[in-house]
Image (tube, rainbow, N blue to C red):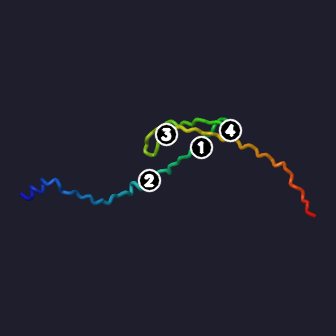
Amino acid sequence: ADSARKAADTTAKRDTTPQAQDISAIRRLLRDRPVPSDKVVVRVAQPVTPGQKYLIRVLGATNLNGARSDGQAVLTVPAPPQPVARDTTRAPQDTTP
């Protein structure tokens, strides 16, 4: 009767002690994987125009999880700085004897 009662007891706690897992295969995969990069170099056929804006689109990029998506950004090419006006004031003459 006691054994039947134990078998029917659904309030028994299960063992939740963390078990040691072999993660050597995961470490090996991570070691061989290239380091992710967030940089890209684009060569254009013609020079970009200073002061202009360009829409950049990337189609079908794959992220680290394997999901594919598109992205876009605006590139603003800075205008060249205006030349600094030359100082044309004369230095005062030395009047000390």
Kindly identify which numbered label has been placed on residue 41.
Answer: 1
Residue type at mark 1?
Val
| Residue at the (50%, 51%) spot, across then down | 35
User: For the residue carrying disc 2, how many other residues have a C-alpha within 10 Å: few (<14), some (14-19), or many (20+)?
Assistant: few
Residue type at mark 4?
Pro
Q: Are marks 2 and 1 in contact (CB under 8 Å)?
A: no
Kindly identify which numbered label has been placed on residue 94.
Answer: none
User: For the residue carrying disc 1, how many other residues have a C-alpha within 10 Å: few (<14), some (14-19), or many (20+)?
Assistant: few
Q: Are marks 3 and 1 in contact (CB under 8 Å)?
A: no
Disc 4 to disc 2, C-alpha distance: 43 Å
Disc 2 to disc 3, C-alpha distance: 21 Å
Q: Nearer the viewer, mark 4 or mark 1?
A: 4
Frontmost residue, 19 versus 53 = 53
Kindly identify which numbered label has been placed on residue 50.
Answer: 4
Residue 23 percent across, percent down from the top left: 37, 57
Frontmost residue, 55 versus 20 = 55
Q: Earlier in the sequence, mark 3 or mark 4?
A: 4
| Residue at the (71%, 42%) spot, across then down | 80
Q: Earlier in the sequence, mark 4 or mark 1?
A: 1
Residue 64 vertical position relative to residue 19 in the rendered view, above or below = above
